[in-house]
């Protein structure tokens, strides 16, 4: 973290000292954390990482903040599981699922929040805040509770009941806004100018975003310090996708991988909110904002802040960006659960259904080592799946009733 040196504008390259700022004063481009990679190279090793904590903090030198004292902001080091049954079903060869449902609040957002709040504490903030499509609200409210910060989370009022409850339980302030995420985000940008709070995805966004790199680090380490050939990543703002790409390449920069990795990065969106997939299909650079309408609410950002950069990563790595209908999202959730015993939320349904589609189209190939990112838990989006699954049958508590209901089992016995 001593190697995190400055913030740099992604557009004009101007540098700024480390502070809770997020846009370039000169060109309004987004700011990104920069590092002294030579210094990191001299101090990092596979062995030191292996001896580190079972969390994102094992990669401390590649993050813009050191691990806060205690285990207050834990996240990461989630399982990477081989998914042979799902692979067979999709006609793929080597397929892995990065199961990020296994985080403290059951989504990958715990990673970004750990970094953002670590930095917020450094800066001396007393209140954490965010604009959220649901999972970020969970993660901020929980991490604020653990670290003794006050919290204000802002969400669209039509969010899933499960996501509201699993946020409100932590006792912070949950402010529902009559509007979509893009309205909430705009309001938060205004609030950030007025209130001295750490808005994790506004004024501390450059630090927050770096937390997503840990998904790439873990993937490579868990593959025995090798990289996948192709990854499939869900897109909301597009930040996660760009940071997974950045993470793989940093591992080479700091000497943890011998060769420059070649990883195709594909994006996944719900058809009802697919501005990046649309730009990809149309072959244009501009990501046109849309009004979201999909059950995949955690991905429902109509005006994605990093959409342009995500599109650039997808194109330059030879990936693709697919989109799937809400019915396909539900089918994707069920397919993952049925084949691998992993219950992902609607965003996972988007990822798995898009993976299936790209496999059918021959974009994701049988000869590739593929990793799909399952970023949130299905228990938070029960509304989406409730109309589609139920008990197999209901019977009285009698042996003959069971035999009558399952005659084929009686024959087998
Ligand atoms: C926020 C979120 C994403 C994508 O995040 P971005 O970095 O905004 O693209 C993916 N999956 C889930 C479950 C999320 O909550
Ligand atoms: Zn600039």
Image (tube, grey):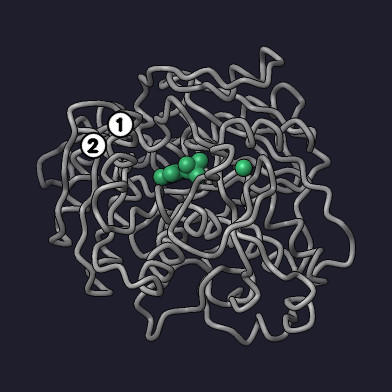
Asked if labels 1 and 2 touch by Cβ distance under 8 angstroms, the answer is yes
Image quarter of residue 323: top right
Q: In this view, does 271 lie above or below 343?
A: above
Residue 357 percent coordinates (x, y): 63, 25
The quadrant of the image that shows the N terminus is bottom right
**Vertical order, 227 against 37 (above or below):** above
Mark 1 crowdedness (10 Å alpha carbons): few <14, some 14-19, many ≥20: some
Task: Name the quadrant containing residue 404.
Answer: top left
Residue marked by disc 1: 384
Residue sitting nearer the eye, 40 or 241: 40
Instruction: Name the residue that disc number 2 marks.
Output: 160
Comparing 247 with 25, the one in front is: 25
Left or right for 379, reference 89: left
Question: Which corner quadrant of the image does residue 121 belong to?
Answer: bottom left
Residue 194, percent across and down? Answer: 25, 48
Q: Residue at 68%, 86% (x, y): give it.
A: 48
Give x and y (percent) for residue 349: 46, 35
Marks 2 and 1, the one that precedes in the sequence? 2
Label 2: which secondary element:
loop
């Amino acid at each position: 973290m001593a190697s995190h040196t400055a913030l740099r504008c992604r557009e004009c390259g101007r540098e700024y000292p480390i502070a809770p700022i997020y846009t370039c004063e000169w060109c309004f481009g987004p700011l990104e954390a920069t590092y002294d990679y030579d210094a990191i190279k001299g101090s990092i090793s596979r062995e030191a990482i292996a001896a580190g904590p079972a969390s994102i903090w094992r990669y401390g030198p590649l993050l813009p903040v050191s691990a806060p004292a205690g285990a207050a902001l834990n996240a990461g080091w989630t399982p990477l599981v081989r998914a042979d049954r799902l692979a067979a079903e999709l006609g793929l060869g080597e397929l892995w699922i990065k199961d990020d449902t296994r985080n403290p609040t059951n989504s990958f957002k715990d990673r970004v929040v750990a970094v953002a709040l670590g930095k917020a504490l450094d800066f001396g903030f007393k209140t954490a805040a965010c604009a959220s499509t649901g999972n970020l609200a969970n993660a901020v409210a929980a991490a604020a509770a653990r670290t003794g910060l006050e919290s204000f989370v802002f969400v669209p009022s039509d969010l899933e009941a499960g996501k509201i409850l699993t946020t409100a339980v932590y006792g912070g302030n949950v402010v529902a806004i009559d509007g979509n995420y893009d309205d909430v985000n705009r309001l938060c940008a205004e609030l950030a100018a007025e209130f001295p709070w750490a808005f994790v995805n506004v004024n501390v966004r450059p630090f927050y975003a770096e937390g997503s790199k840990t998904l790439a680090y873990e993937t490579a380490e868990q593959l025995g310090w090798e990289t996948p050939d192709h990854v499939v990543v869900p897109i909301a703002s597009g930040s996660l996708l760009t940071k997974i790409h950045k993470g793989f390449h940093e591992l080479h920069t700091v000497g943890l991988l011998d060769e420059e990795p070649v990883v195709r990065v594909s994006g996944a969106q719900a058809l009802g909110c697919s501005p990046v997939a649309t730009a990809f299909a149309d072959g244009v650079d501009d990501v046109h904002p849309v009004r979201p309408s999909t059950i995949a609410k955690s991905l429902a950002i109509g005006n994605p802040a990093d959409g342009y950069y995500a599109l650039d990563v997808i194109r330059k790595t030879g990936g693709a960006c697919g989109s799937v209908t809400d019915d396909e999202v539900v089918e994707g959730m069920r397919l993952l659960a049925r084949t691998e015993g992993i219950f992902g939320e609607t965003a996972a349904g988007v990822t798995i259904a898009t993976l299936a589609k790209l496999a059918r189209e021959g974009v994701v190939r049988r000869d590739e080592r593929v990793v799909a990112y399952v970023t949130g838990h299905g228990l938070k989006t029960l509304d989406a799946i409730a109309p589609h699954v139920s008990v197999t049958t209901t019977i009285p508590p009698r042996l003959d009733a069971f035999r009558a209901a399952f005659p084929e089992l009686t024959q087998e016995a």
